Image (spheres, rainbow, N blue to C red):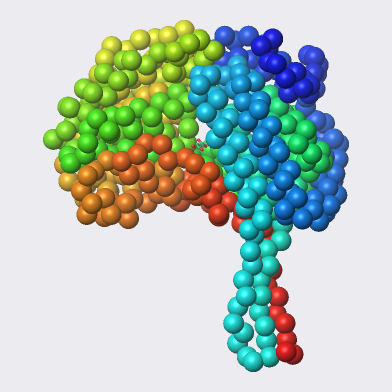
Amino acid sequence: MQQINNKSLLSFMVTAADNAVAVTNPATGELVGHAPISSEPELMDAIERANVAQKEWAKVPAKSRAVLLNRWYQLILENKDDLARIMTVEQGKPLAEAAGEVLYGASFIEWFAEEAKRTYGDSIPGPTADKRLVTIKQPIGVACAITPWNFPIAMITRKAGPALAAGCSFVVKPSDSTPLCAFAIVELAYQAGIPKDALQVVLGESSRQIGAIFTSHPLIRKLSFTGSTQVGSVLMQQAAKDIKRTSMELGGNAPFIVFDDADIDAAVQGAMASKFRNAGQTCVCANRFYVHSKVYDEFVTKFDAAVQQLKVGNGLDEGVNIGPVISESAKQGIQALIDRAIEQGAVPVSALKQLDGLFMQPVILKEVQHSMDIVQEEIFGPVAPVIRFETDEELIDMANDTIYGLASYFYSQNIHRVWKVAEALEYGMVGINEGIISTELAPFGGVKQSGIGREGAKQGIDEYMDVKYLCFGGN
Ligand code: SIN
């Protein structure tokens, strides 16, 4: 990490020790550094300190909290290049994409700095002449989060921003694969003046241990999790025992639909952006493509031509669009889905190439059937299975035939169809003639087994606040 200018971003790093997570670069396999692990007593202490800090933080006027959050936002912008480099080295995404994530992550801090000042209650007409009814919003208390490796900065700021803005304290456990980004971004918050106990990063002996503590510790009031549906379900069951609030941003199986009245070139552009962002490793990546039979061949040909332009490699190298996948087990899982699809009758559009290390050649599979495993499962890799459809009715049935309901996308130029399909899709988010939908301005979240709660937008801060109803009698 010689090229990091602001050394304070990595001041938390420890030299190899028993109590440390070793971080390796997925592009090269080289050791990047070690991040400290907290012992169980240290974790308990962290939560107790967060509880004390929360009481003080909640007393800081919303306008002053906003000032500190805005300072944090500015420091993230000032350190954008260093943060992007740390991200590329520990997570693998290309440098330009990493810089994009830093800005995306920063946008949540900017947005929630503003929202801190707008946590309005209501005045409600009373049921009788002598009663006055009012609601106020108050911070939940200590909030904690478990965040993933695929967006190692943005998934933290999307939760820490609203939590701190609301007056909660916040303890986050990042992925063991990408802790450097987490410690670095929080270091900037401290430099901005956010109290150290009000915002903490912790790593534990295992994710299971942290999950158990975060869902059972009596001082923790809220858990926000981004990750798989399977783990989310376990955490919700654990949190249910003490009725803790949870927000869950879980798996997806996004359909990307191209109708016969679509602008095919625009659809190809959207497909490239949606499918290959972060090498296909996002919960909102298009997972399966449904293309009307009249435009199927044209779409597949143009899509493949665009895919052949993608450059796979180390994200630090100029011109690379697709970095490595995160781990050997991830690579094997994606490869197994491709192999099974081909056994089941799918056809690769261009010759398949096996790449070394954790790199994977992006691939389009045609003649895919809706029933194939590759359509039913979340791929989380650079593979695009394309299915043919004939009627809108059949299409809607297939698109909704999943336990998931996070993102969906479709391309059509017929306004009547646009409204009908947008309303019929059982998803929390719908991109219409658009492949990139994520922004701090809009509510991000899913339905069905894709999760509960919304992040970003005006809704995001409510996840960290309780509504209290005040009834003034005898007036
Ligand atoms: C995710 O994959 O979990 C988040 C993607 C996004 O925010 O766009």
In the picture, residue 285 is in which quadrant?
A: top left
Q: Is residue 215 shown left or right of residue 259?
A: right
Q: Is residue 206 shown left or right of residue 385?
A: right
Q: Please tell me whether residue 178 is drawn above or below residue 431 in the rendered image.
A: above
Q: Please tell me whether residue 417 is drawn above or below residue 291 in the rendered image.
A: below
Residue 132 % position (x, y) = 67, 83
Residue 141 % position (x, y) = 75, 54
Q: Please tell me whether residue 56 is drawn above or below residue 308 in the rendered image.
A: below
Q: Is residue 372 shown left or right of residue 166?
A: left
Residue for point 33% across, 47% down: 400
Pick out the residue farthest to the left.
Answer: 294
Image quadrant holding the N terminus, namely top right
Residue 371 % position (x, y) = 29, 36
Residue for point 45% across, 23% down: 279
In the rendered image, is residue 4 in sight? yes
In front of the other: 36 or 403? 36
Residue 467 % position (x, y) = 66, 65
Q: Please tell me whether residue 170 is drawn above or below residue 285 in the rendered image.
A: below
Image quadrant holding the C terminus, namely bottom right
Q: Is residue 388 shown left or right of residue 168?
A: left
In the rendered image, is residue 220 in sight? no
Residue for point 65% across, 44% down: 161
In front of the other: 177 or 211? 177
Residue for point 41% across, 19% down: 335
